[in-house]
């Protein structure tokens, strides 16, 4: 299946979860978002320095192209970093569950790449 269809399966399964599995899925999902936000903020500050933009409220005279480049770089990097956070958090959780024998490796991979809860949770 393609990336979009896997995401559709993820959303469908997440809506069907009940009880403790739903709570656990929500905790994992919000952890992914939190890690992604930390990555975005860190990259935003580091890239601002890298593009030569002042960190204070100094005027941006003569720095228009750096500002445009920084905004474009930040806009492109946000979805990439959020997906990286999904892979990191989902991968750690999926691997731990696979090591404990609760997930198969395929389910752990789906958790890491798409944030998809396993079918036996539904």
Image (cartoon, helix red, strand yellow):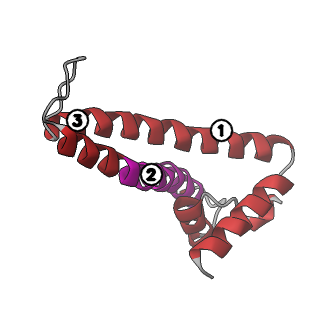
Residue 54 or 2: which is nearer the viewer? 54
Q: Residues within 10 Å of mark 3 (few under 14, many from 20)?
A: some
Q: Where is mark 2, residue-wise?
A: 88
CA gap between label 2 and label 1 equals 14 Å
Quadrant housing the N terminus: bottom right
**Residue 22 located within the stretch drawn in magenta:** no
Q: Secondary structure at mark 1?
A: helix
Q: Are marks 2 and 3 in contact (CB under 8 Å)?
A: no
Q: In the figure, 26 relative to 13: above or below?
A: above
Residue 38 or 91: which is nearer the viewer? 38
Residue furthest front in the image: 61
Residue 16 or 97: which is nearer the viewer? 16
Residue 84 or 109: which is nearer the viewer? 84
What residue do we see at 51% from left, 35% from top?
34
What residue do we see at 16% from left, 36% from top?
63
Q: Decide which of tag 2 and tag 1 comes sooner along the chain.
A: 1
CA gap between label 2 and label 3 equals 25 Å
Relative to 105, 54 lies left or right: left
Q: Which residues are magenta?
A: 75-98
What residue do we see at 87% from left, 47% from top?
18
Q: In the figure, 5 relative to 71: above or below?
A: below
């Amino acid at each position: 299946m393609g990336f979009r269809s896997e995401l559709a399966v993820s959303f469908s399964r997440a809506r069907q979860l009940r009880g403790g599995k739903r709570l656990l899925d929500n905790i994992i999902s919000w952890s992914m978002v939190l890690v992604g936000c930390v990555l975005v903020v860190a990259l935003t500050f580091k890239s601002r320095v890298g593009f030569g933009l002042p960190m204070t409220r100094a005027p941006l005279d003569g720095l228009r192209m750096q500002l445009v480049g920084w905004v474009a770089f930040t806009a492109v990097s946000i979805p990439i970093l959020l997906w990286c956070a999904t892979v990191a958090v989902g991968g750690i959780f999926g691997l731990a569950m696979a090591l404990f024998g609760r997930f198969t490796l395929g389910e752990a991979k789906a958790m890491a790449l798409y944030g998809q809860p396993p079918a036996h949770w539904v």
